[in-house]
Amino acid sequence: MKKEKMLIVFLVLLVIASAVQAFQLVSLSSSISSGSITKAAAPLASSGTAQVPSNLQNLPTMVGGC
């Protein structure tokens, strides 16, 4: 009996969490469609290629080392 009650409580919590996430998704979707949230795009260089951030310039030398 105790095992069944714990399973029911767990399932109820999962349903509540799913409902909260669905509400957040609908809210986010409406915010995006209304234009209050916009997608941020990385600026491109004048040649049309993206610039590599300075912390990634020496990435090949960092692989495999501490």
Image (tube, rainbow, N blue to C red):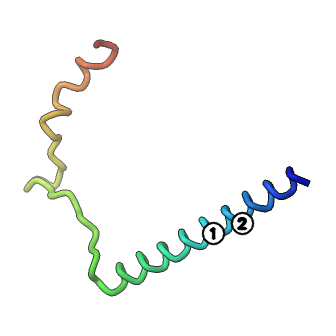
Q: Position of residue 26 (x, y in %)?
A: 49, 79
Q: Residue furthest bottom?
A: 34
14 above or below 31? above
The one of 11 and 3 positioned closer to us in this rendering: 3
- What amino acid type is highlighted by mark number 2? Val
Q: Quadrant of residue 65?
A: top left
- Relative placement, left or right, of 21 versus 37 is right
Q: Position of residue 30 (x, y in %)?
A: 41, 83
Find residue 43 and name its label: none
* Residue at horizontal 24 percent and vertical 65 percent from the top: 40
The kind of secondary structure element at disc 1 is: helix
Q: Residue furthest front?
A: 2
Q: Is residue 3 above or below residue 30?
A: above
Which amino acid is tagged 1? Ile
The residue carrying pointer 1 sits among few (fewer than 14), some (14 to 19) or many (20 or more) residues within 10 Å by Cα, namely few
Q: Mark 1 = which residue? A: 16
Residue in the foreground of this view, choosing between 23 and 51:
23
Q: Residue at x 8, y 56 (%)?
A: 46
User: Which secondary structure, mark 2?
Assistant: helix
Q: Residue at x 43, y 79 (%)?
A: 27
Which disc number belongs to residue 12?
2
- The answer to whether marks 2 and 1 mark residues whose Cβ atoms lie closer than 8 Å is yes
Query: What is the residue that sits farthest to the right in this orientation?
Result: 1
